[in-house]
């Protein structure tokens, strides 16, 4: 038997996990009505993070502003994000997956890959096994998943995105002409909107069209690297292994879509402080430091700009990253155009202990690091909002309450 991969994906994870909790408490199932997880209904601020199928039928889209969603569906049920609940349910369903698979790779909080290669003697029917995993998760925890089966990660991922919810689908190499090639080219995993537009303008309308187009022409349309990547994917080619442990991060980043436009620097600084606290906590937990700090801003016309600074001495200290991010922000922003997104990235990662000099005196720098580590321990034990800097609490934006959920959602490792 050859390679065999499962992709397990929670159906509308945040909403499903909220619904399962409510059903367990004897409340109605919000998956059956127009419902969404997102920002503040009363203030009509924030964005939709997840939605029910009835909400989707109302035209509501993930990522759209709450105000727009409520105009489409005035009776939309809304709940605030609960990331403690999400992490708990993520761990539960992946633990079940680990009971069956030799190797499980966590792709995100709500999806994972299972390398089932070589298990045919134990599980001779992979489809039956996928149903067993799916049904156990539903029956034990009250939420549903889709399971995709294929000979590689791409095919398993594409299969899991077929009809939802609570389904098992296969996409084997022999099934590509019937199941994959008729799909619109924009449905191919990793083909974004801009790339899909370029392909459609070149009369490449389906995944099959892409698969049968000469590689050189595809590369001319979308670029050498992307062209080769999506041409391989269209033909079902993906040599990427399922990894039991994630690869070391090449960088750490975090961003937040702001509920209200930032129109003054003193509104942005507390947000940058919260971002700096979060991203440095992650980099410290991995025993790493960064030689480069970058700040990204996006205005209300969706124009994105970024600015970075290379450091002689690597850092993992919140206070330093906040100070650098403020300086980068001041250099980057024109002080006039309202902003909708702020982000911080730490790249050029090292795990070496050598330091040459610092922005602070050595004594002050070590003191700052000890404070950070003490805060990390308390937050890990009692929750991420246990220790919040005073300047954050006192700010008009109140970062601790207003942005935490969205920041945690968009917190990405390895960008």
Image (tube, rainbow, N blue to C red):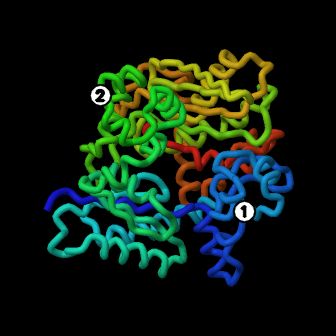
The residue shown at (45%, 75%) is 137
Seen from the viewer's position, the closer of residues 279 and 13 is 13
Residue 283 in view, yes or no: no
- 1 or 2: tag closer to the N-terminus: 1
On-image quarter of the N terminus: bottom left
Which mark identifies residue 214?
2
Seen from the viewer's position, the closer of residues 43 and 382 is 43
Side of 375 where 353 appears, left or right = left
Above-or-below relation of 296 to 235? above
Which mark identifies residue 340?
none
Above-or-below relation of 361 to 385? above
- Could you say whether the residue bearing mark 1 is in a helix, strand or loop? strand
How packed mark 2 is, by other alpha carbons closer than 10 Å (few <14, some 14-19, many 20 or more), is: few
* Residue 95: % across, % down: 39, 69
* Residue 410: % across, % down: 58, 44
Q: Nearer the viewer, mark 1 or mark 2?
A: 2
Side of 344 where 116 appears, left or right = left
The residue shown at (54%, 56%) is 380
Side of 153 where 288 appears, left or right = right
Above-or-below relation of 333 to 406? above
For mark 1, what is the residue? 79
């Amino acid at each position: 038997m050859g390679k065999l991969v499962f992709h397990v994906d929670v159906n509308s994870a945040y909403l499903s996990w909220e619904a399962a909790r409510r059903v367990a408490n004897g409340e109605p199932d919000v998956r059956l009505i127009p419902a969404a997880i997102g920002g503040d209904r009363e203030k009509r601020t924030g964005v939709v993070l997840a939605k029910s199928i009835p909400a989707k039928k109302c035209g509501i889209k993930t990522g759209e502003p709450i105000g727009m969603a409520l105009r489409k569906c005035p009776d939309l049920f809304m709940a605030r994000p609960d990331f403690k609940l999400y992490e708990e349910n993520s761990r539960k369903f992946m633990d079940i997956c680990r009971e069956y698979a030799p190797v499980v790779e966590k792709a995100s909080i709500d999806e994972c890959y299972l390398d089932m290669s070589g298990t045919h003697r134990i599980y001779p029917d992979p489809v039956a096994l996928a149903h067993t995993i799916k049904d156990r998760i539903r029956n034990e925890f009250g939420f549903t998943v889709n399971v995709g089966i294929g000979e590689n990660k791409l095919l398993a991922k594409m299969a899991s995105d077929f009809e939802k919810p609570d389904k098992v689908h296969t996409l084997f190499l022999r099934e590509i002409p019937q199941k994959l090639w008729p799909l619109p080219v924009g449905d191919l995993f990793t083909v974004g909107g801009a790339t899909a537009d370029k392909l459609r303008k070149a009369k490449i309308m389906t995944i099959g069209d892409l698969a049968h187009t000469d590689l050189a022409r595809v590369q001319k349309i979308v670029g050498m690297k992307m062209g080769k990547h999506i041409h391989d994917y269209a033909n079902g080619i993906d040599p990427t292994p399922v990894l039991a442990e994630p690869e070391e991060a090449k960088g750490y980043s975090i961003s937040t879509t702001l509920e209200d436009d930032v129109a003054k620097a003193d509104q942005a600084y507390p947000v940058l402080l919260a971002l700096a606290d979060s991203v440095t906590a992650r980099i410290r937990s991995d025993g790493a430091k960064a030689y480069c700090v970058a700040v990204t801003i996006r205005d209300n016309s969706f124009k994105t700009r970024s600015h970075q600074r290379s450091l002689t001495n690597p850092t993992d200290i919140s206070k330093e990253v906040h100070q650098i991010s403020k300086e980068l922000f001041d250099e980057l922003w024109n002080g006039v155009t309202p902003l909708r997104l702020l982000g911080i990235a730490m790249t050029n990662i090292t795990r070496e202990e050598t330091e040459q000099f610092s922005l602070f005196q050595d004594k002050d720098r070590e003191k700052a690091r000890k404070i950070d580590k003490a805060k990390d321990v308390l937050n890990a034990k009692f929750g991420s909002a246990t220790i919040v800097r005073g300047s954050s609490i006192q700010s008009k934006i109140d970062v601790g309450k207003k942005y935490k959920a969205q920041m945690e959602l968009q917190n990405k490792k390895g960008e």
